[in-house]
Image: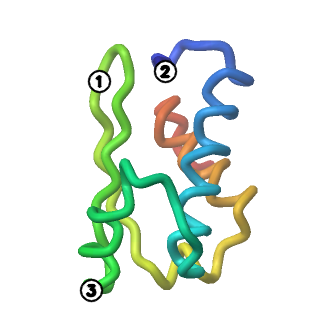
């Protein structure tokens, strides 16, 4: 688990995994059974909420399937990382 003050590379590693799952789900690839049913239900809607459990909080991020489809995995990971670390866009 991480906190907003965890080493950046630790948070980035976590967000890379999250972005990878989201991109694979959007493309219809097989994903971890832990998330498969929830994502199958979420695919019926235009957007959904991703819950990210951290040591110091639970972060809820609303995201659309269009955003996931149109955003590169690395950029999606960076955006999630900034949300987790509470970094505001400049």
C-alpha gap between disc 2 and disc 3: 32 Å
Asked which secondary structure carries label 1, the reply is loop
Please give left or right for residue 74 compared with residue 85 in the image. Answer: right
* Figure disc tally: 3
Q: Which residue is mark 1?
A: 57
**Nearer to me, 27 or 53:** 27
Please give left or right for residue 74 compared with residue 24 in the image. Answer: right
- Sort mark 1 into few (<14), some (14-19) or many (20+) by Cα contacts within 10 Å: few
Tell which circle, 3 or 1, labels the residue nearer the N-terminal end: 3
Position of residue 1 measured from the top left corner of the image (x, y, whole percent): 47, 18
Query: With respect to residue 46, does 33 lie above or below?
Result: above
Query: With respect to residue 71, does 78 lie above or below?
Result: above
Tell which circle, 2 or 3, labels the residue nearer the N-terminal end: 2
Please give left or right for residue 30 compared with residue 37 in the image. Answer: right
Which residue sits at x=48%, y=42%? 83
Indicate the quadrant where residue 6 lies: top right
Per the rendering, the mark at residue 4 is 2
Asked which secondary structure carries label 2, the reply is loop
Which of discs 3 and 1 lies nearer the camera? The answer is 3
Disc 2 to disc 1: CB gap under 8 Å: yes
Query: With respect to residue 12, does 21 lie above or below?
Result: below
Tell which circle, 2 or 1, labels the residue nearer the N-terminal end: 2
* Coloring applied to the structure: rainbow
C-alpha gap between disc 3 and disc 1: 28 Å
Position of residue 17 measured from the top left corner of the image (x, y, whole percent): 62, 44
Disc 3 to disc 1: CB gap under 8 Å: no
Position of residue 81 measured from the top left corner of the image (x, y, whole percent): 58, 40
- Sort mark 2 into few (<14), some (14-19) or many (20+) by Cα contacts within 10 Å: some
Q: Which residue is mark 3?
A: 44
- Sort mark 3 into few (<14), some (14-19) or many (20+) by Cα contacts within 10 Å: few
Asked which secondary structure carries label 3, the reply is loop
Position of residue 33 measured from the top left corner of the image (x, y, whole percent): 40, 54
């Amino acid at each position: 688990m991480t906190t907003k003050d965890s080493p950046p590379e630790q948070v980035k590693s976590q967000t890379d995994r999250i972005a990878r799952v989201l991109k694979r789900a959007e493309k219809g690839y097989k994903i971890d059974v832990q998330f498969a049913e929830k994502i199958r239900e979420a695919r019926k809607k235009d957007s959904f909420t991703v819950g990210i459990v951290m040591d110091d909080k639970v972060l809820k991020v609303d995201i659309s399937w269009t955003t996931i489809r149109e955003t590169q995995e690395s950029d999606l990971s960076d955006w999630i990382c900034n949300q987790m670390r509470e970094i505001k866009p400049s």
